[in-house]
Image (tube, helix red, strand yellow):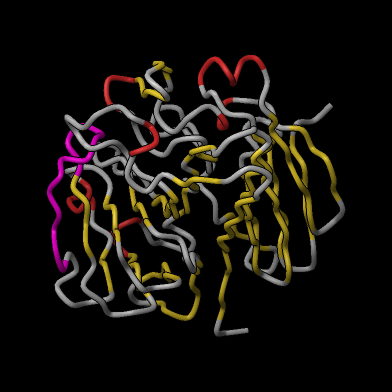
Amino acid sequence: MSKLVTLENANLSVQISKNGAELHSVYHKQHQQEYLWQGDKEVWGRHAPVLFPIVGQVEDGFYEVDDVKYKLPQHGFARDMEHKLITQDELRCIFELKFDHSTMEKYPYKFVFRTIYEIKGSKLSITYQVDNMDMEDIYFSVGAHPGFNTNFIPNTSFEDYVIEFSDKEPFERLLLDNGLRSGAIEHDALKGEHILPLTFETFKDDALIFDHFKSEYLDIYAKHYEDRRLRIGFKDWPLLGIWTPYQKRADFVCIEPWYGVADLRDENHDFKEKYANQVLHKEETFSATFTVEIIDNED
């Protein structure tokens, strides 16, 4: 039985894997173009991993809840587990991951985590939901990590593209040190601009991580062909990562809306005090949505 689920309308064909509830394809029929990175183990073998219950790294590979240590790999365990498909039609599907013995060994809270995919026109929406099934507050981070092709216009490659944010603003960049936050902040990281030219050198010190921004979306497009754009919407998400593997010189960029971020170096390991972690009270549900839309002004 195939582990891929397909959603389809007149504009889009979208595929999602039950493994990790991971998006595998965003194909635009009129353009005859794949917009999602298709994975290459020599470069980056994933497509769009789902990050839960942490985003980034915890220092020394562990964290503590009520003085008990738990080990977690970077970005958590959801991306490497099989999620149950609980509903599907042509335009929408819902995957579910529920706590069990194996998750409780790594993460001491009882939860239900859902990933909801829905297409309408040339837009895909992805929603993450967390239900607190515990008898107490639960703490978590959640985030997206989709990679998008930067060659969707013929005869173009990575450095032919720019990212344009919806607002001009004093972007704050949180700087990384070997995968952890260093504590340093670069203020006004885009120098008052709202356009970020894509260059590999931009990522020589790891991902760009923006905090306290107003922009609700960004567009990716080729500098000399602005009519076709890939728009990523992230209204109300508090953090945003942008990444490509600096050494690999590959034709993709990851746009990563986050509720949560990597640990601060030399900080305590208390999970309840982790910066940007979410707290969810008993019987409550957390929900956050981001969107991927192909815009073609020639249409």
In the image, the segment drawn in magenta is 176-188
Q: In the shown orientation, is residue 3 left or right of residue 111?
A: right
**Residue plotted at (73% across, 69% down):** 120
Q: Is residue 78 magenta?
A: no
User: Does residue 54 lie above or below 279 as drawn?
Assistant: above
x, y percentage for residue 70?
Answer: 43, 18
Q: In the shown orientation, is residue 20 left or right of residue 62?
A: right
Quadrant for the C terminus in the image: bottom right
How many numbered badges does the structure rendering display?
0
Q: Is residue 169 visible?
A: yes
x, y percentage for residue 23?
Answer: 62, 45
Q: In the shown orientation, is residue 92 left or right of residue 174?
A: right
x, y percentage for residue 69?
Answer: 39, 16
Which secondary structure type mostly characterizes the magenta part of the structure?
strand
Question: Which image quadrant for residue 240?
Answer: bottom left
**Residue plotted at (75% across, 31% down):** 3
**Residue plotted at (55% across, 61% down):** 290
Q: Is residue 24 visible?
A: no
x, y percentage for residue 206?
Answer: 23, 42
